[in-house]
Image (cartoon, helix red, strand yellow):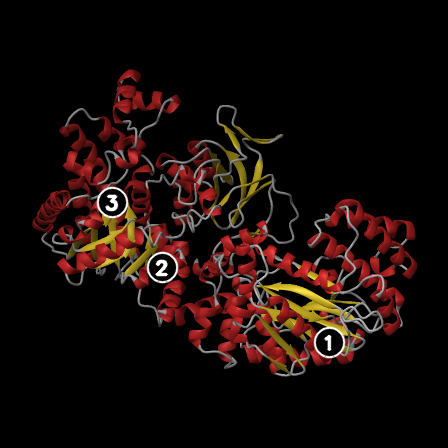
Amino acid sequence: MTQLVYFFGNGRAAGTREMKAILGGKGANLAEMTNIGVPVPPGFTLACSTCLTYLQAGQRPEGLEAEVADNLRRLEEATGRGFGDPANPLLVSVRSGGPVSMPGMMETILNLGLNDRTVQGLAALSGNARFAFDSYRRFLQMYGDVVLGVPAQQFEHLLKAKRLTAGVATDAELSEEALRNLVEEYKGLIRHETGTDFPMDPRLQLWGAIEAVWKSWTLKKAVDYRRVNGIAETLGTAVNIVAMVFGNMGEDSGTGVAFTRDPSTGERRFYGEFLVNAQGEDVVAGIRTPLHIDEMATRLPAAYAELLRIQDVLERHFRDMQDLEFTVERGTLYLLQTRTGKRTAAAALRIARDMVAEELITTRDAIQRVNAAQLDQLLHPVIDPSARAVPIATGLPASPGAAAGIVVFDPDVAESRAARGEAVILVREETTPEDFHGIVAARAVLTSRGGMTSHAAVVARGMGKCAVVGCKEVEVDTTRREFTVGSTTVHEGDWITLDGATGRVFPGDLPTVPSEVVRVTQGQLAAAEAPLHQAFAQVLQWADGVRRLKVRANADTPRDARVARAFGAEGIGLCRTEHMFFEGDRIHAMREMIVARDEGGRRRALAKLQPMQRADFEAIFEAMNGYPVNIRLLDPPLHEFLPHGGEESKLLARQLRLTREELTRIVEGLRESNPMLGHRGCRLGITYPEITEMQGRAIFEAAVRASRRGLDVHVEIMVPLVATEKEFTHQRAILEECHTQVVRAMGYDIPYQIGTMIELPRAALTAAEIARSAEFFSFGTNDLTQTTLGLSRDDAGRFLPGYVERGLLPEDPFQVLDVVGVGKLIRMAVDDGRGARPGLKTGICGEHGGEPRSIAFCHSAGLDYVSCSPFRVPIARLAAAQAALVS
């Protein structure tokens, strides 16, 4: 029969730290500490599989009760006490512990085994009746809450009342008599709420606690934590049953939590808090104000010296920063837990770099010690931690960072007020490309609709701007120029602050703290004066040495390109030409082209746009000197460039010398029921080849100009939304003719490549045909996800979270690539494309290009590069290295 229970004690343990899948992290590390001689109270661990069996079958696994009984006898022998013995009682803690650390998400019960008889024995053994009844009231509260379902607040009300009647400020000041009375009140509360007396049989108590810990795997907070952190639902939790040691036995006892290094900064100093005459939950729950760990040196000097020795032993043994829980019982130190400590991104980088210098780990270890997604914390401003404020709403954290500004509801107003030096936040129901100039001007964007890959989210991330999207509580009224959240109304001109890392919206102007990494990147701070940036740069340099995937950036402007290069981008994987049309007076020329009545009118308008595009491309080639620049031809449907009513329509009609009715007719004629699948991408270039001609000439002329200036130019032109090979060859022929004309006119040739964006299932399925003419594939996974799953990324946010919660989808496919469906199409396209054209260059340019798990897939699928928003380039560099190390 498979072993289900594992004992540890007296210097020997049945498990090791390698058995986390079986014993959970806590159980495996308790066993490991026992084996290396760290003072750990004896106990035993029920394997994680027992949790899964219980939850699936609704009953205890066969043979488990006998194994628990055997190990309980061993624990009695190891401690010299009896479980339920009224004269010499053995008390235990019952604690959860999954294979992956989930701090505070599951249940713990202390002092189990106490009842009306054993409490007297504990009082006699300890010579401290107050301590015994303090332990008993704690047990009644924890067991009543966790196992019996009596709300913890009801116990707290009784405890608070007892402090008030006793005239004391803290629990530690309550007398023995007060605690005896509180015990009776707690038992009365349990009887009233459950209809039965509190169980006095320790064995019934034990099994009630075990089953409660198993059930805590399914608590909402635990499920949510696993979903957010990508932890599998199928792991289950172990149950650790450990002999109690008591930190509440008097002034020579205490309890605490400590880290072997500072978890916020990574500094190599012992960091933590402790309390004298307390139990563990007092520190964690904030019941009392803890003392700094340094004060332990004077309050409990011998135990502190031993703790300093042991923390060093544990860090060197586990070769990572450790998070410790300890108890001191009458001067004797016991370790109750050690685990890899949670840390900020800044701390992770510093610890990784320092541990390499200390020869504790290798550079490869260091690369894997930093959570790639966490690097985002370092690239955006954050709200000053000292600020105290209550959020009025919470949406989706679309783009990290923090920003404060006055609320505006119109992109033109945002632009004009920002031009006057005002800090503005653009608030919209949702954004469109027409709002681009407003987003550029704003410090942050707030929308009431849309998801993590909506227009606002994608553009904001690309620009490194804070954004909170899909904030359903916010009701936007652009007519009144206000938004409401419940009974709160925020008017245009009022200040708000957004926290893009958490999705929270605050009233008022909260102070923000600049990012050190960004200040160095922008030349505002010398690298020598920025220790965090030094660690950041060092770890990324190690990562660059092991990764295979190249990392490019999605950049639409010279400024974006420069930011991307500063963050280490090795080229541009997506330059969206349509965003250039919204700057300055370009939009007027674009609109003139759209409303033109014939080809001649369109060509006259396009002639105005060509020099503007050429100048943009030349500046981008300059910023990316020596690296490839992939320019996507015009993609969005034309109606997105036109206003949809209001004063702007009146003004545009006058500018274009049209009647209001004529303009309305044109706009309505361009309107589509499903524009995502409508007249856009290469279809525009086929209908209006003059658009492709203008863009082709602008690209080639810019490349020649840049090359003549001595720049190393690598041109890639991407045809979007191709479904058939004939569509692609049609557009390629136009571009090749443009190249011929430019070379003839300018007397200078430049190399170039023409490829396509694979964003339709048919294109992936017919990749071998398309690759006969295309020199590269770039997978546009935003649209490929939409067209494969039949989901609109802007609308699916209304129900996708429910799909994930119900397990219908493992992740939001717009945030983490659907490797089973979309991934299969990508693999097929790569294999078939390279079969037709050996050496075909392939990359990804959707939002997934900056998401670590999606990057790991790209590595395994054999892609050549990923492309992402400039501010996610460091994340992609590190994630690509981690993918290479585990492949």
Callout 1: 10 Å neighbours few (<14), some, many (20+)?
some
Q: CA distance from mark 1 to mark 3?
A: 67 Å
* Mark seen at residue 855: 2
Given contact means CB atoms under 8 Å apart, are the residues at marks 1 and 2 in contact? no
Given contact means CB atoms under 8 Å apart, are the residues at marks 1 and 3 in contact? no
The quadrant the C terminus occupies is bottom left
* Residue 493 drawn at (x, y percent): 55, 33
Marks counted in the figure total 3
Q: CA distance from mark 1 to mark 2?
A: 52 Å
Q: Amino acid at mark 3?
A: Leu
* Residue 15 drawn at (x, y percent): 56, 77
Callout 2: 10 Å neighbours few (<14), some, many (20+)?
many
Q: Earlier in the sequence, mark 1 or mark 3?
A: 1
Marks 1 and 2: which is nearer the front? Answer: 1
* Residue 810 drawn at (x, y percent): 43, 51
| Above/below status of 692 relative to 71 | above
Residue 519 visible to an observer of this rendering: no
Along the viewing direction, whichever of 264 and 742 lies nearer the viewer: 264
